Amino acid sequence: MGFTQFLTDHMMQFFSFTGFANFTVGHLIMILIGLAFIYLAIAKEFEPMLLIPIGFGILVGNIPFASGYQIGIYENGSVLNYLYFGVTQGVYPPLIFLGIGAMTDFSALISNPKLILIGAAAQLGIFGAYCIALALGFSPSEAGAIGIIGGADGPTAIFLSSKLAPSLVGAIAISAYSYMALVPVIQPPIMKLLTTPKERLIRMKPPRAVTKTEKIIFAIAGMLLTTFLVPSGLPLLGMLFFGNLLRESGVTKRLADTAKGPMIDIVTILIGLTVGASTQATTFLTWKSVGIFVLGAFSFVIATTGGVMFVKIFNLFLKEGNKINPLIGNSGVSAVPDSARVSQVVGLQYDKTNHLLMHAMGPNVAGVIGSAVAAGILLSFLL
């Protein structure tokens, strides 16, 4: 009898530490969301490089466990907690920006500088969502962190939220990356609604050739100008333009290849997995998280609308032959290069010979700069 009792007690103790004993409805909901992310990445090919790490991270973060064993991402000393340090302290986003700079060709923007205004106009989504979040009762710091979702820039969203609202990093990052993946679904209906058949057929002049010297000067001058304007954006903007200088200098090819290849891939894996794991149901699944997700959708709609409407208004002051096709207005959000591809796809639906991709890349890369500048502005008065 003593042995039976001993065995029973130990079996019960073992069961109490299993995931089955600690399972909740919240864990089930988050696991289903993680599976949905993985499905969209594999079956629909929506941002697989992001959604697969994040989706699997959600599964990892929602395996139920008893506390005290240094397993969870929020438990000091756990492996996941150490990896998550790069998110909470804003280490990973600048490294992502270094890789983005090394893989980005700013020629389209340099050849037609006025396209930077479209990238600036699309940042309306950030400040529009900020105002809505304030009206809904979020604190100014939380509202600023939520608003950056409208920039369609996951690394910037993580960087800013880690400074302004660390407790919301998971919800904001998941929202930002989710809507980035859904850019081909969200933007086309807005673009078609806001443009006329005549506007969709506007042909733009081919971009001029840009010299190597111009590209080098742009990388250096762009860094100096933007960081003097918003020094708080230096970690992102400095790394972005440094990566671009590695690319354009022509003498640091190995460094540029490392930044845009192995390094950005490693950081993407770490940031995706840990952000996904941070959606632990016991801390993540709240009404505030749901509100952030809804506000994220509004911010994307506002950003796309702002970009398209700005082009329509701007065209009123441009001569025939110099007008801009408003279908590239959506690319002002910094989901590179997905939003530019959306401009191309929608444009080809109305004219099979009107290729807008090269033109759309101008405001698209301007949006990357614009979202980082907007993050710096928000940090300057909210931190």
Image (cartoon, helix red, strand yellow):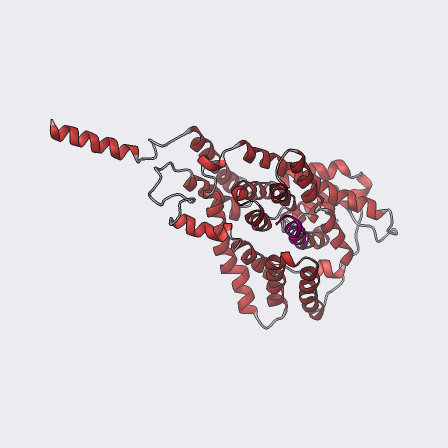
- As drawn, which residue projects farthest toward the bottom? 251
Q: Is residue 31 magenta?
A: no
303 sits left or right of 178 in the view = right
Residue at figure coordinates x 56%, y 42% from the top left: 172
In the rendered view of the protein, which quadrant contains the N terminus? top left
Q: Position of residue 206 (x, y in %)?
A: 77, 57
Q: Look at the picture and state if 249 lies above or below 171.
A: below
Residue at figure coordinates x 66%, y 37% from the top left: 134
What number of labels is visible? Answer: 0
Is residue 254 among what the camera can see? yes
316 sits left or right of 150 in the view = right
Q: Position of residue 67 (x, y in %)?
A: 35, 39
57 sits left or right of 367 in the view = left
Which residue is more in the foreground, 103 or 58? 58
Which residue is more in the foreground, 135 or 369? 135
Q: Look at the picture and state if 309 lies above or below 262.
A: above
Q: Look at the picture and state if 77 lies above or below 225.
A: above
Q: Position of residue 43 (x, y in %)?
A: 51, 39
Is residue 355 among what the camera can see? no
Most frequent secondary structure within the magenta stretch: helix
Examine the image and state in which quarter residue 233 appears: bottom right
Which residues fall within the magenta stretch?
Answer: 369-383
Residue at figure coordinates x 59%, y 33% from the top left: 291
Q: Is residue 376 magenta?
A: yes
